[in-house]
């Protein structure tokens, strides 16, 4: 696949995107993308919301992984 023409690689990328769009719900992907960008970059929000049931040491390990 390394030596394929650029139009072949572009076609392959578009078919992968098309398959992903029609085999999954894009609204869930949109919500996940926004949660990732706006919540998971803030360590305090992740500690209080997502990892609230874990100890502080475990929260640090999970967040850093």
Image: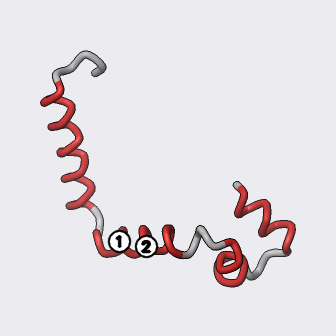
10 Å neighbourhood of mark 2: few (<14), some, or many (≥20)? Answer: few
- Residue beneath the point at 56% across and 75% down: 39
Q: How far apart, in angstroms, are the residues tagged by discs 1 and 2?
A: 6 Å
- Residue beneath the point at 42% across and 68% down: 33
Q: How far across and down, in percent of the image, does residue 54 sit?
A: 79, 75
Residue named by callout 2: 34
Label pair 1/2, CB-CB below 8 angstroms? yes
Camera-nearest residue between 43 and 16 = 43
Which corner quadrant holds the N terminus? top left
Camera-nearest residue between 43 and 49 = 43
In the current view of this chain or complex, which residue is farthest to the top? 3
Query: Does residue 6 sit above or below 39 in this rendering?
Result: above
Query: Does residue 4 sit above or below 35 in this rendering?
Result: above
Using residue 11 as the reference point, say whether residue 32 is left or right of it.
Answer: right
Q: How far across and down, in percent of the image, does residue 2 sit?
A: 30, 19
- Residue beneath the point at 58% across and 70% down: 40
Secondary element at image label 2:
helix
Q: In the figure, residue 59 lies in which quadrant?
A: bottom right
Q: In the figure, residue 46 lies in which quadrant?
A: bottom right
Secondary element at image label 1:
helix
Which corner quadrant holds the C terminus? bottom right
Query: Does residue 12 sit above or below 31 in this rendering?
Result: above
10 Å neighbourhood of mark 1: few (<14), some, or many (≥20)? Answer: few
Q: Which label was assigned to residue 56?
A: none
Using residue 33 as the reference point, say whether residue 51 is left or right of it.
Answer: right
Using residue 57 as the reference point, say whether residue 20 is left or right of it.
Answer: left
Residue named by callout 1: 30
Using residue 27 as the reference point, say whether residue 55 is left or right of it.
Answer: right
Q: How far across and down, in percent of the image, does residue 29 sit?
A: 36, 68
Query: Does residue 23 sit above or below 27 in this rendering?
Result: above
């Amino acid at each position: 696949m390394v030596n394929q023409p650029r139009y072949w690689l572009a076609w392959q990328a578009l078919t992968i995107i098309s398959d992903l769009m029609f085999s999954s719900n894009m609204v869930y992907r949109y919500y996940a993308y926004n949660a990732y960008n706006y919540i998971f970059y803030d360590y305090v929000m992740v500690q209080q919301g997502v990892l609230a049931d874990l100890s502080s040491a475990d929260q640090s390990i999970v967040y850093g992984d």
